[in-house]
Amino acid sequence: MRICRFDDDRVGVVMGDEVVDVTDAAAALPPVRWPLPRGDLFIAALAELRPEMERLSTTGTRRRLADLRLLSPVANPGKIIAAPVNYQLHLDESRKDTGINFGSHVKTIDEYGVFLKANSSLVGPAEGVVADRPERRTDHEIELAVVIGRTVRNVPEAEALDCVAGYTIGLDMTIRGTEDRSYRKSLDTFTVLGPWLVTADAFGDPGAVDFEIKVNGETRQKANTRDLIYSVPKLIAYASHAYRLEPGDVILTGTPEGVGPVQPGDVMDCRIDGIGTMAVAVRGPS
């Protein structure tokens, strides 16, 4: 199933070039009061909501996908976890390019571990990326994004994929500089998820998936997840030994070689096999 969030927080099931509105299925979510429960309520209840979503997908209002404003398919992630230098060729280019490393030694993922991005950086493809620091290089980084579906801690690598709700395309935007990654990658609009969530059963094995990003029609990054240094299961297991993973948590799995700068007016066309495509515009300050 491909599930999107669109317009004014409507929920849709994507079918070809149309979206069926299944928002009424969310009425089954439990009422909440402060202090709010941790994690994303919709993702936590996804298995229970799916039968009603499937029923509504045969009767609900259909809209043209092209007419919708697509938001991040995950509304309230508790954590956005990211993997640095998780492709060997990106590690190599990062060590060679002073525009990336600023004279510092780029360590391996074994040395770095994972890092966290601010939830306030999250947007959907329709909202676009704001590049408002002309004195700094702002780079694109396309990644397969994993959405956690249940609470786990210290999950074994062999069982890691069992806790995945689904997959989506991720853009891990960054400004280059000497500051910590959690600062440079957490600016507003610097985490883009979309265009929808593909449930784990529909997506299948994340271990050999082609993906690509073009900027203004020019291919910048093109790779396959088989080249990950830490595979998706290993990355989930590794993160779960540091943090309790909860429904709606997002893990950005790392970007391959070919990162490069973007500026206002550019359009980033992103594709991941098994998910689809999304176009993300780069905007200047509003």
Image (cartoon, rainbow, N blue to C red):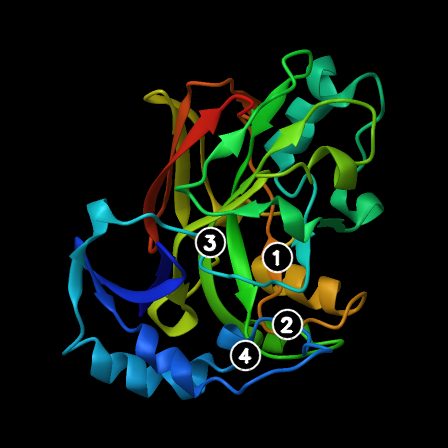
Mark 2–mark 4 contact, CB under 8 Å? Answer: yes
Mark 1 → mark 4, Cα distance in angstroms: 16 Å
Q: Which residue has dot 4 on it?
A: 44
Mark found first going from the N terminus, 1 or 2: 2
Mark 3 → mark 4, Cα distance in angstroms: 16 Å
Three-letter amino acid code at the position of disc 1:
Ile
User: Circle 4 sits in a helix, a strand or a loop, which is it?
Assistant: helix
Q: Position of residue 10 (x, y in %)?
A: 35, 64
Task: Say above or below: 132 vs 28.
Answer: above
Mark found first going from the N terminus, 3 or 1: 3
Mark 3–mark 1 contact, CB under 8 Å? Answer: no
Q: Which residue is drawn at 55% across and 21% down?
A: 260
**In this view of the protein, which residue sits in the foreground, 69 or 194?**
69
Three-letter amino acid code at the position of disc 3:
Ser
User: Circle 2 sits in a helix, a strand or a loop, which is it?
Assistant: loop
Q: Does residue 79 appear left or right of residue 270 in this picture?
A: right
Numbered mark located on residue 160 in the image: none
Q: How crowded is mark 2: few (under 14 residues within 10 Å), some or many (20 or more)?
A: many
Numbered mark located on residue 72 in the image: 3
**In the picture, residue 178 is in which quadrant?**
top right
